[in-house]
Image (tube, rainbow, N blue to C red):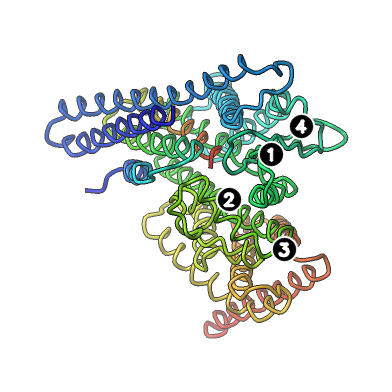
Amino acid sequence: MMSKKLDTKKLALSFILLSILNAIFSNLTVKTNRYLADVFLLIGSGFLFIGIFFAIFMVISLFKESQNQLLKSDLKSSYNKNVNNPLILQLKISFILQLTGLSYSGLVSTYIVWILHITDITSIDLIISFTLSFLLEIMTAILILPRLDPFRETRPGEIRIIKLHNFQGGITMGVLTLSRHSPFKSIIFMGDEDDSITRTIEAHELGHATEHHPIFLELSIIFLLSISYPLIWFGYIMHREVISTFLVIKTVLIILSVVIAILLFMRVAESRADAFAYKVIGKSAYENLVEALRRAYGENIKSAEDAPLWSKITHTSSRNAIKTGDPLSSIGIWEFPVVLSFIASTIAITRFNSIYIIYPLFFIGSLVISFLIGLVFLPFVRKYYRMTERGSLNFSFLLAGIYMISSIIALDAYPNLYLVISLFLTGIILAFIITKAFLDLHNSTKVVVATLLIYLSIIILISLIKILPHGG
Amino acid sequence: MIFPIGIDIGAALIYAGFISGSVTTTETLSLVFFGGAGASAGLSTTADAQGYILLASALLFVGVALLVTGIGFG
């Protein structure tokens, strides 16, 4: 069965690769031979759909396996404990979110274009349709997802552990629900062995479940869908001439920012779960993790860095957090400044009418500023963070990045001073909430107040230096 | 000539998919979905540049759907 699955994977990937090659040929030939470019484009689309067919075939084989096991099983009434069930559940969730996202954004876009007869799409129209699609989709997710099979039997607020035979690693899933007890339902899928390795995996997954990481992921997926789908609908309905290319580029930058922010969030969430596992299991947690990786990916794994690429992208490559107990020690030093500067420059660009030179300048500028401010914060943050050196540095960069993003968001509302102040205050509250996730209440108050004062004094100093030579 | 970014990203992910020898089903699925998303985005940009709006929109919908499914498995 395993070899069959591997073949389907290679077939799907080969056809997708062929479609990419055709797209490249189409791009190369479009100027010299239009007819040939069209042929390549259509062949490429055909190959893509064959690739997707094989991907769907992979998914169908999972369903089939699950059904076969259900027929063999005696416990038909209770939830079928099949190894593939978490994957099937995830596919169901994705499918429901996409279908509802597609229909809601379609309805909202057609309402704006055909019923309100708006002929020129502005940023405000886009923001209204993003918000409407987001709210409608959240409502549907809250109503439908908790009623899917294993979640239906889970009580609100409960962290249910489902042990599966022959299951490698662990997956935590969570959905929002409508209940007066708790708005969360969480399920952990993991192997049924009773040894220290499985206990480490359980501790890691419990870290995810107690901090509700899957809920954040669900919300960010809904957010991503509600930004991208309305834009595609508008592009199709309005035949793209009436939406300026610049507006499209800005939205694409926003989508890219959301994607890299999700990726960074995943890495921090995995490191926090690793740190949680270290606190529960102790010093043997790292060896248990390497052994768990060896079980999943083969005997060649000697350390966490030998894990496959995708695992290293989402779970960090060093997995230092499970050795040190410091959640920020596995994140690279460049990660917070680069990602937060990308987000900051995307927000800053929304007020400008050209991005070609300004965007790279904004990006490099904010990268340098967040790096320098982070270094200024470091001595103070180190005193309260009290874990690893890398962790303190990353925490300083994180705080510097959040302050920078808050200032840029606030400056976007410039002529309205009340809005500027309230937006900056919202940013500070956000910084406090994030700090609270890493430090206790007393220390996080101290750190936020002190770093904020340092940040404000740097800004005032720069303004004075800029104003004084020009005579105010 | 610079190709649409979707093509580059898709090609990189497919390469990652091929070189990852023994992967679990979650990772296999997410890489296939991400590769498909990159390819759809690349083809969609190509179709859009050549004036096929319906094809470009359909490919973009498919691309976003694949991307979101891939993120779910990440």
Q: CA distance from mark 4 to mark 3?
A: 27 Å
Which label lies toward us, 4 or 1?
A: 1
Q: Nearest the camera: B42 or A293?
A: A293
Q: Are marks 3 and 2 in contact (CB under 8 Å)?
A: no
Q: Earlier in the sequence, mark 2 or mark 4?
A: 4
Quadrant where the N terminus of chain A is found in the figure: top left
Q: Which residue, given by chain and number where applicable, does mark 1 sit on?
A: A188
Q: Against A38, is A67 above or below?
A: above
Q: Earlier in the sequence, mark 1 or mark 3?
A: 1
Subunit of label 2: A
In the image, which disc is placed on residue A177? 4
Q: Against B2, is A395 above or below?
A: below
Q: Are marks 2 and 4 on the same chain?
A: yes
State the SS at label 3.
helix
Within-10-Å neighbours for mark 2: few <14, some 14–19, many 20+: many
Q: Which residue, given by chain and number where applicable, does mark 2 sit on?
A: A266
Q: Are marks 4 and 1 in contact (CB under 8 Å)?
A: no
Q: Is residue A112 visible?
A: no
Q: Which residue, given by chain and number where applicable, does mark 3 sit on?
A: A438
Q: Are marks 4 and 3 on the same chain?
A: yes
Q: CA distance from mark 4 to mark 1?
A: 17 Å
